[in-house]
Image (spheres, rainbow, N blue to C red):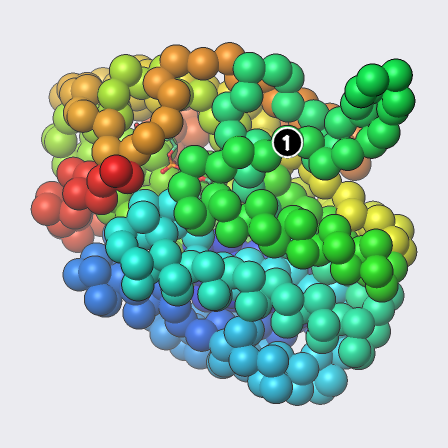
Amino acid sequence: MRILILGGDGYLGWPTAMRLSALGHEVTVVDNFLRRLACLEQGLEPLIPPPPLHRRIARWRESSGQEIALRPGDATDYAFLLGVFRETRPEAVIHYAEQPSAPYSMLGHREAHLTLVNNLASTLNVAYAVRETDPACHLIKLGTMGEYGTPNIDIEEGFIELEHKGRKDRLLFPRQAGSLYHTTKIQDTDLLYFYVRMWGLRVTDLMQGPVYGLLTPEMGHDAELFPFFNYDELFGTVLNRFVVQAVAGIPLTVYGKGGQTRGYLNLVDTIECVRLALERPAEAGELRIFNQFTETFTVNELAERVQQAGRSLGLSVEVQNVANPRVEKEEHYYNPMHRGLLELGLQPHLLTHDTLRGMLEQTLRFQDNIRRDAILPRTQWK
Ligand code: USQ
């Protein structure tokens, strides 16, 4: 297939590009390097310095013999994006080109504005470019489990059958986000649902939980192909942060009581979910929603597992409850459904002791790069 990946430089975008390229697809990546720029502005560095995208692509060519095409540019620039669609004629587009951090979106007005404009304008542009060039092109959009929040009822996969005053309907599941970033994802879903109904687009919206992991098979041990792995409070997801903290001998930063529950998945499974969605596209006129995670954990459970794995490697891992910088429930009901991707054939890589040991061992290789001043949360929600 001809596949366009928007946000191909990021934590998920780059490993996805390599995987799809390894499978023989014709892959083009677009990126405006927003993540690199935001890290520079905020004084943050990923654990393993990622070479510029054109160098990673050259490296991938050397190791695999496969080509990935690069079109640097901004998905919020419609003329640019439409040009790329016209040139590459994608049969599927994977939209990762969003500002992905909840804390970043809560830093202040400038960052909130950037998040809102970037995420909504890019999504609008993708919908228009698909309609303009080939309405049959399958649009795969990365959503988030955070769109649903933590309601006191079971979370369905996207839609809920409701009976109200004796009448029934199938409606989008109620959403109530916990950050401005998550709110833009709700708005993305609404935009896409609107254009699915208006124009008959085919869209898959992947409601993904926090991702963890460093390696995918395509990387081997070649650090030049490793993903953009952050461990700071802005761009690092919780389990990746805990692994780095364990290696650095910093007490694991459990926010508040640590009963916050989320649905997690391995980086390898993220890419597998996208592949499965690609190979079995949504129908024309369908907004198909999958809840994309494999297991749920509380933050305390994650900390405990990292502690055990760390101790088995001789690390002394402590846990510290720090004041929660976020506004979120610290103890709550959480029971989200996640059948759709399993039905498509997903074989989950679960969070085992060995997986955690592997992550710790990889991180130990780069322990001299860890910046201790990037760990503690500074961004307050209130
Ligand atoms: N947390 C801690 N300690 C930390 C960092 C986080 O206790 O040092 C807690 C948070 O308060 C939260 C949970 O861990 O309750 C998850 O936090 P996170 O930073 O791993 O995830 P989040 O900010 O929600 O965002 C991440 C990705 C985002 C994605 C989302 C999926 O950055 O792109 O959409 O996970 S979900 O959380 O399901 O909305």
- Badge 1 is on which residue? 174
For image coordinates 42% across by 25% down, the residue present is: 354
Whether residue 104 is visible here, answered yes or no, is: yes
- 49 vs 367, left or right, is right
Residue flagged by tag 1: what amino acid is it? Pro
Picture quadrant where residue 125 is located: bottom right
Direction from residue 50 to residue 15 in the image, left or right? right
Within 10 Å of disc 1 (Cα), the crowding (few <14, some 14-19, many 20+) is some
Of all residues, the one furthest to the front in this rendering is 165
Residue 190, percent across and down?
A: 67, 50
Residue 339 vs 182, above or below: the answer is above
Where residue 364 appears, x then y in whole percent? 23, 40
Q: Quadrant of ligand 1?
A: top left
- 1 relative to 67, above or below: above
Residue at the image point whose x is 64% and y is 23% from the top: 155
- In depth, the one of 182 and 80 nearer the eye is 182
Res. 279 in view: no
Specify the quadrant of the image occupied by residue 358: top left
The one of 290 and 372 positioned closer to us in this rendering: 290
Say which quarter of the image contains residue 111: bottom left
Q: Is residue 313 left or right of residue 376?
A: right
Quadrant into which the N terminus falls: bottom right
Image quarter hosting the C terminus: top left
Image point (78%, 47%), residue name: 287
User: In the image, residue 355 lies at what x, y percent?
Assistant: 43, 29
Q: Tag 1, which secondary structure? A: loop
Residue in the image at 18% along x and 25% along y: 323
Q: How many numbered badges does the structure rendering display?
A: 1
Percent position (x, y) of residue 356? Answer: 38, 28
Label 1 C-beta lies within 8 Å of the nearest ligand 1 atom: no
